[in-house]
Image (cartoon, rainbow, N blue to C red):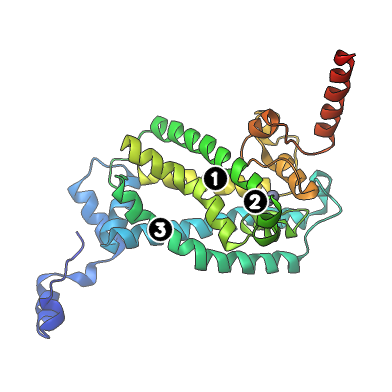
């Protein structure tokens, strides 16, 4: 598998030459590792072999996870935002835009992308880097075979519920005067959000709300000792997609909340950006419903009706 270099290779000038003959490290390419893995563990599936080859190729677990996680985050963030940027330029989609008079300009999108990138490299990169040692400390599994689909699905469902709860309370707290003024105001620069603006926020906010995505898996792993890093990756991809889609500004007849009434989606979060109050949760609608913090004209109407009904009852 990957070659390990001893101190000799660093101190003895002749050592490398010998090693070149003895150990053909010029062949230490990703596909060479893949070939070796396939030979030694043919029972693994294709993705498991790719996975093993990647870790063997990099030869350092923290580095291998760090590079893979950061690249994945960037590809998913910008890859998922791109279709929304294209849709913004197609007039036929305008009828689905919730605040259809406010389509973001290319300059607005570019300014937003610049701040998001800065925050990715300065705040999220160190966080992502620290994740592996921290997760390994609590017993995160990084090897093969991968967990079953069922295990991944129920763990991710739990993370969604926990993240939404964390998000509801910390986001609601961020709307308290001093916290809003000093931290959360940046995220509310766009009263009509768009996909790229999902992580347009103060570095402090990225850390506070990001804890909702990273904290539950770490906690889960510390308690149950049953979490694979692949589950973590799928969770992050889904959570990122949820955040970007809920900022997209588009409501379609086929949007998920029409089929899953408790799913929040863009319909829920767009109103939060427009009205600056209410609809604090991220993925689900239940916290806002139960605690009566729903935003928008329909919620206001329901509140009015309830008041009238209560007044009648009191008479
Ligand atoms: Zn807010
Ligand atoms: Zn937002």
The answer to whether the beta carbon of the residue marked 2 is less than 8 Å from any atom of ligand 1 is: yes
State the image coordinates of residue 226 (x, y, percent, origin top left): 32, 37
Q: Is residue 38 left or right of residue 156?
A: left
- In this figure, which residue is indicated by the disc labeled 3? 68
Q: Secondary structure at mark 2?
A: helix
Q: Residue at x 57, y 39 (%)?
A: 164
| Residue 8 sits above or below residue 292 on the image | below
| Residues packed near mark 1 inside 10 Å, few (<14), some (14 to 19) or many (20 plus) | some
Say which of 47 and 238 sits in front.
238
How far is mark 2 from mark 1, CA to CA?
20 Å
State the image coordinates of residue 217 (x, y, percent, origin top left): 42, 42
The mark found on residue 212 in the picture is none
| Residue 95 sits above or below residue 22 on the image | above
User: Residue 304's image quarter?
Assistant: top right
How far is mark 2 from mark 3, CA to CA?
32 Å
Q: Residue at x 56, y 49 (%)?
A: 240
Q: Residue at x 19, y 50 (%)?
A: 39
- In this figure, which residue is indicated by the disc labeled 1? 239
Q: Secondary structure at mark 1?
A: helix
Q: Residue at x 51, y 37 (%)?
A: 162
Quadrant of the drawing holding the N terminus: bottom left
Say which of 234 and 313 sits in front.
313
Q: Earlier in the sequence, mark 2 or mark 3?
A: 3
State the image coordinates of residue 261 (x, y, percent, origin top left): 68, 28
- Farthest residue, direction front: 315
Mark 2 touches mark 3? (CB < 8 Å): no
Disc 3 vs disc 1: which is toward the camera?
1
State the image coordinates of residue 153 (x, y, percent, origin top left): 45, 33
The mark found on residue 174 in the picture is 2
Q: Is residue 237 left or right of residue 261?
A: left
């Amino acid at each position: 598998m990957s070659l390990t270099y001893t101190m000799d290779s660093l101190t003895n000038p002749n050592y490398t030459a010998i090693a070149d003959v003895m150990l053909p490290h010029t062949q230490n390419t990703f596909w060479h590792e893949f070939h070796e893995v396939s030979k030694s563990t043919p029972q693994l599936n294709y993705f498991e072999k790719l996975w093993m080859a990647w870790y063997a190729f990099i030869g350092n677990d923290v580095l291998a996870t760090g590079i893979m996680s950061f690249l994945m985050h960037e590809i998913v963030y910008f890859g998922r935002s791109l279709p929304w940027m294209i849709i913004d330029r197609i007039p036929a989609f305008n009828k689905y835009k919730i605040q259809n008079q406010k389509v973001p300009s290319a300059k607005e999108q570019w300014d937003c992308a610049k701040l998001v990138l800065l925050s990715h490299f300065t705040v999220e990169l160190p966080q992502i880097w620290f994740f592996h040692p921290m997760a390994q400390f609590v017993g995160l599994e990084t090897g093969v075979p991968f967990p079953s689909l069922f295990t991944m699905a129920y763990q991710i469902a739990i993370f969604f519920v926990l993240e939404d709860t964390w998000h509801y309370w910390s986001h609601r707290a961020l709307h308290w005067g001093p916290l809003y003024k000093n931290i959360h105001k940046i995220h509310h620069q766009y009263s009509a959000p768009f996909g790229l603006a999902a992580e347009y926020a103060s570095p402090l906010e990225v850390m506070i709300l990001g804890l909702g995505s990273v904290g539950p898996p770490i906690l889960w792993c510390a308690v149950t000792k049953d979490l694979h890093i692949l589950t973590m990756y799928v969770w992050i991809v889904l959570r990122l997609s949820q955040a970007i889609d809920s900022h997209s500004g588009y409501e379609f007849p086929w949007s998920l909340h029409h089929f899953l009434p408790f799913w929040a989606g863009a319909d829920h979060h767009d109103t939060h950006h427009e009205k600056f109050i209410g609809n604090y949760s991220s993925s689900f609608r239940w916290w806002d419903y139960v605690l009566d913090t729903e935003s928008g004209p329909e919620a206001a109407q329901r509140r009015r009706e309830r008041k009238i009904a209560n007044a009648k009852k009191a008479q």
